[in-house]
Amino acid sequence: MDHERAFGATGSLHATNGSLHHHAAAATTISISSTANSSSTASTDSTTKQQSRARAHSHSHHHHTSHIHSSINTSPAAAGTPTGLLASAGASGTGGGLFSSSSMPSLKTHMNMNQHSHHLDQFSRSVSARARRFLRSNFTHFRNSTGTARRIRFGFLLPLAVLVLWLVYIINTMLFRAVFGSNRKNSGGFGPKQPPTWIDRGSITDLDLRPTDGANMTTAILLNWSRLDSLKEIVDHLCPHVMFKEIMIWNNKVDIHLEEKMFSCPKVRVFNSPNNMFFVARYMACAMASSPYCYFQDDDWKIFYLRAMYANFLRFPQFLHTDTNSDVYALTNWRWCFFEDEVNMHACFSWLGTGALATRDSVVKFLKQASVTEMDPLEFAYGDMYFSTYLNQVPYQLENYLMELVDPSQDVVAFSKGSEGKTRNKLYMHKAAQKTWDALSRKDPHFEREELHPTYLERDVRSPCADDRCLVISNKHPFPDVRMFKYRPYIDIEESEKIHTQYEDPTTYIRFPFSKAVDGMDDTAYKSTQPIVQGDYIGIDMLLPVDRKIEFRVLYQMGEQWIKNAKLEIAGKDAVYRTVPLHVSCKEIRNPDYRGKVTSDVQHAFLNQVLEHEVFDTQELEKVYKSGEDGHEDKKPVLSYYEDYGWRTQCKFVVHESSGFRFMRLISGRDERYPFVIYDLGWKVL
């Protein structure tokens, strides 16, 4: 649609330019002829008067017509006046134009010309005078090096320039909104966007349910290079959180000296490094910390979901917790995982710069591992490429919206951006996997061999809610079991990516990740990559036990049988679930902004097909049907659960446990032919 709008605007601009050029060319012809004959104006007027008198006394139609043509062709001013143009236009038209002898009897032509010749003469002189005034007011003269007089058509150029600039502004605005507005809308996150207002979601601010466990048990480690303004913004964002005992800033920029007084936070401690220590600086800073936990973040990202991630980290501190978006999640949880049961290898690579939580003990252990694996100084400096893999435990990764901080005053290219940065990163990721495999083969005691619980297949926490007050939980895995691929040290990262992508392309999950179910938007959805089977669930972690009446709301686009066969379970902080009665009230919701052509009857017929019908097909969008006797291939609209039909089912139910509950989940009671299609899963205090 954006391309069509841009093309339409461009076509209009071309048409406008063509029209302007046509009229400009005509005006230029008039101007040149008028200038060339300016010296004979008096004789021209005299000749015109004589010819008018001669035409008035002429009684021969043949002589009269010949005289008119002679005047048009031979008069010095005829070709340069609007009268001459009118005559020429008339002569070239169908039927002979204004003076065609074939369109009327010769006597009638003779009488009309005698009656109107005087008025035509006055009209000709009036138009000529107006044309000269217009040319003088809209054209200026200049002379080139040869002395030839030329004209600049400011009268046309200025309006044309304004028109072009206006069209460029409109087109750029449309493209900007289409690109950046849609990316923001589809990325999730509570900070930079507003939810749609076509559904009343009620107030969720009646009770401030925010966890305070783990206060002052974490040190935030921030690496600085040259983004001081962004660093200050990050410090202001982290400072109010009670989890942070200190905020340690490691300054890798040698020619910049930072001080605590430069930041408006009493928790800040600054260490100005004598050299650029690259990524290993964050681990050295963590080893220096006095708290049991460390939080890592680069200076070019803003992380919104600290409470939710920290609440889950306190449940499972044995795992590195990282934060990223759906695109990177598909890499670090599918294509960048390394499993080999023969040597007890179960590792995945994960970034730390977009928010990560780890124990101080695991960081100290990594510094020892760097020594026993004989990492050279450059490998040691690129510690981020090794840390998560050396743990030999799949990181507990949460997927959500990320905000990159861009400082327009700084021409700084991120370390990992560009083809060179990506190639370098993959090279050292490959070296880290090789060294891990080698250490496990030798049964090096510095490397963990046992896979800790919950394993990546047992985990169910997926994404933080948009307001950082809950987590969406589900046992539905977005990717196949990565254990089917056996790691081999001679397979590099590029080849590993190809193997995994050929087996399962993660594009569907990247478009419809878990975070879209809890991003506060009713026009974005989480859509599972596989159909629902009995026992699949989706729910909410409230982050702490709640003893108030909570109304949950689920907005979905699936068959009606799912909610009818689902059961409701709740659990306290011990995560021991029990079944409670489920009383739902449901209604259909239409999106007034939807402009699709699929009717409501067709939607319902498709969404509520009986279970025995065609098995759910993830490739429905790629189907091509043949139509017509010639067998011509024609892509027709194909109904798919991955499309939005503007129709939703909204169901609400209330949970109240006097002793408090933390977890709620809806469990499917049977196999279904469709995937999860959850547009919103939220709650409010009653």
Image (cartoon, rainbow, N blue to C red):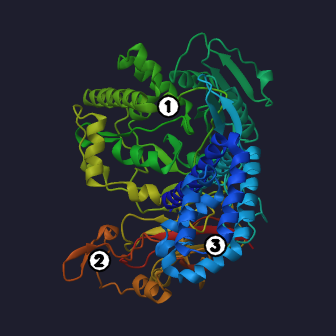
Quarter holding residue 640: bottom left
Q: Toward the viewer: 211 or 419?
A: 419
What amino acid type should be assigned to the residue bearing mark 2? Val
What amino acid type should be assigned to the residue bearing mark 3? Phe
**Residue 514, x across and y down, in percent:** 50, 59
In the displayed structure, 347 sits above or below 686; it is: above
**Residue 152, x across and y down, in percent:** 66, 38
In the displayed structure, 476 sits above or below 220; it is: below
Q: Residue furthest top?
A: 274
Mark 3 vs mark 2: give the one in front. 2
Give the spatial CA distance, label 2 vs label 1.
47 Å
Q: Residue furthest left?
A: 630
Give the labeled residue for mark 1.
362
Q: Are marks 3 and 2 in contact (CB under 8 Å)?
A: no
Give the labeled residue for mark 2.
615
Q: Toward the viewer: 63 or 388?
A: 63
What amino acid type should be assigned to the residue bearing mark 1? Ser
Give the labeled residue for mark 3.
552
Give the mark nearer the N terminus: 2 vs 1. 1
